[in-house]
Every structure is written in structure tokens, then in C-alpha cells.
Image: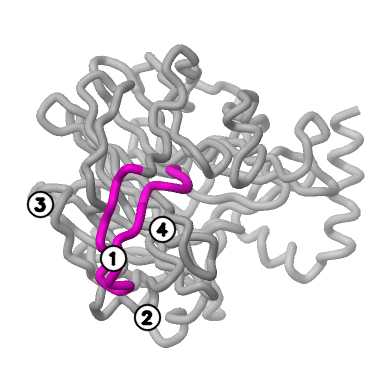
Amino acid sequence: MKKFLIILGMCAFFVQCKNESSQKQEIPQNTESSSKDWALLPFVKTDSVNPVLLPDSTLIFTCPIRQTAVKWVQKDVFNPATVVRNDSIFMIFRAEDIIGKYAGTSRLGLAVSTDGFHFSKMPEPVFYPDNDSMEKYEWEGGVEDPRIVESEDERYIMTYTAYDGKVARLCLASSQDLKNWEKHGLVLDSEKYRDAWSKSGAIVCKQVGNRFVAQKINGKYWMYWGDTDLFMANSDDLIHWQAVEKMDGSLLRVLSPRPGYFDSRLVESGPFALLTKQGILLIYNSMNATTFNDVTLTEDTYSAGQALFDKENPVKLIARTDENFFKPDKPYELVGQVNKVCFLEGLVWFKDKWYLYYGTADSKIAVATCEKVLR
């Protein structure tokens, strides 16, 4: 039955979207490995402690743009990045207040844990819209959804989304200590892409102990990005990036939605992309469409899959999971600001296991663990 539904969905999809889908298929999308040895599985949700981070109306911050005190963590916390430093996990999390015309402004806070499960928040955000050159891009929607890797000289490189209320733009910042950040502007800063929608930058890195260090391939750093299809950008220095384009000047798609599957509506980068012996492992978030979808999931469900790209050619997809490995099934994942959402974004190696942190229903943060050692 599933095969019939998939075939039926694909036929209808290509009839209705012939021109668009023909463009999307420059990279094969239904590649599947006969073995899942390359994938990072299984992850087990830590039900005894979840959610591990909640909103908090007691934390006050004086917004430099509003010039007033705001309860910056009052509404929601979600979609974190995580790193290990000095035997602790440091979490950069997205938090929202309840003020303004966009149902709250997003800022990034910092929380610390010595066991991976119990976190203490710093009282004020460490990254936020300010009276600076980025205000026009960040106000008043805010700054969202961080992802962090390290550079070889031990700087933290963070991609994030700036939202002005109309357009989301992928941006970049760096820090030596996770508290003080330098904003480097838009990732796609050419006139062609400056006002185009862009999000979710996952930089290719390698594991060095419990650090994840950006790694050059063929003389370039690489980043997967996008929240409909996935595209790519590359860089010489981790700060200045260029979009990867086809010969005709259009963006090169490297991962696309698949009718009939859990990722039938959209695909979006998860944490960093990890270089392994078998290839570049990318955990990605996805959304189930309203039609021609995975009938085992309800419509609009955010679940997650994994993809493997060639380690010598980062645009080449070589394997992809046919089923989601992570989906909302807990009350705090099913009901919230946005229902039916698990959004995976923070990943660390800590105390001999993987800790995966994710936003639940765009409202809280939870964790799952995996003991597999990648080869």
C-alpha cells in the first residue's frame, strides 16, 4: 500500500509541478543505503527529565532598542545550539518575549549544565537586536535558531537567522567565550541574494574529542542551508560566503522534499554537518505535507531524517533515510506555540554519548541520547 501511495503521489506531484520538479532533480533525491551503518541511531528521549529548559518570566533585560525592561524569556524557549567546554554543556537557546507586532521578539540566551540534563540560565541574553548595523535585519522579529561550530583557532562560529518581520536572512557571528559576540553580517551578502529568504546554516565540521571543528574540503569550507529545499554555500575563511550555483546562475539544490514521505513538504538543516569516514552526515528537520504525504504521520508534523553526502564532493547525496528517526509523540511536543514539532538543532558528544537537544512545539527544549560511536 505504501508503495502504491508513493507512486500515486509522485505522479500527481510531477504533473502539477513539472517545471519546478525537473529543476529539483539535478541531485538524485531517493538514494537509500542498504545499511544504516552510516546513520547516527538510535536516539532515546530522556523522559525522566524532559523538558530540560522552560520559559521563565522572572528574567529581566533592558532592551537597547525599546529602552524598556522586558521579560525576555517569558513566552517560549526552543531551537538551541550546544557546545562542550570545560566539562560542561553550554546551550545557546532562542527565547521570546510577548511584546510587539510579531508575537514576541527573539533573543539568544546562554544556559549551562554539568550533567546534560539540568541547566542554569544566565539572567540576560548574550545575543540580541541592538542599535547596530544589523538592526534593520534583526528588528523587531529578532535573532533565531543558532548553530555553532569551532574554527581551528578556537573561535566559535555561529550561524543564525535575522528576522525583520518580513524576510528571514541567514547571518553569522563569532565569539571567543560564547558570551561576547561579533556580528559579521549576512551570509549571502551579494545584491542578488541580500533580500531573499534564507535560513538554517549547518557548517561541515569534524569531531576532535568533544569539539566540532569546521573542516575544509577541496580547499573550501562548506555550509548546507535552506528551509524548503537545501542549498549550499562555501567560504575561504568561515566569515565570507558564496552561494553554490548551477551553470545557469540558479541555486543548486542538494536535498529536496519527497512526495509520499515524512519530508514531503520541506527539508531544513538540523545541527552542524558532521564529516565521518563514510561521508558527511546531516541530520535534517522536515515537515509532512497536507497531500501526497506520509500517511503514518498527521499533516504538518515536523519530524527528522538523516542524509549522507560524499566527503569529497559535498553536493553529492549518496544515502538518505526513508523513514523519520525522530517525531513528536509527547504532550509537550504535540501542543504548544506550533503543534506537532520536534526541531533538532543542538548536538554534542559528552561523557561518552551523544546528546541531542531540540525544540518542542516551539515552546520548550528537550534532550535525547545515543551511545553509538561513529566510524
Instruction: Write the start and end of the magenta stretch as one range.
Output: 58-78
Q: Amino acid at mark 2?
A: Lys
The CA span between labels 3 and 2 is 26 Å
Residue identified by numbered label 3: 176
Residue 134 painted magenta: no
Q: How many numbered callouts?
A: 4
The CA span between labels 4 and 1 is 12 Å
- In the displayed structure, 201 sits above or below 259; it is below
In the figure, is residue 286 to the left or right of 260? Answer: left
Give the class, few, some or many, for how many residues have Cα within 10 Å of label 2's Cα (few <14, many ≥20): some
Q: Position of residue 146 (x, y in %)?
A: 36, 51
Quadrant of the rendered structure where residue 162 is?
bottom left
Q: Amino acid at mark 3?
A: Gln
Q: Residue 109 — which label?
A: none
| Camera-side mark, 1 or 3 | 1
**What SS does tag 1 mark?**
strand
Q: Viewer-proximal residue, 194 or 207? A: 194
Q: Amino acid at mark 4?
A: Ser
**What SS does tag 2 mark?**
helix
The CA span between labels 1 and 3 is 24 Å
Q: Amino acid at mark 1?
A: Cys
- In the displayed structure, 134 sits above or below 18; it is below
Q: Position of residue 62 (x, y in %)?
A: 25, 62
Tell me which label, 4 or 1, sits earlier in the chain: 1
Tell me which residue sits at (42%, 40%) in the image.
55
- Residue 240 visible (yes or no): no
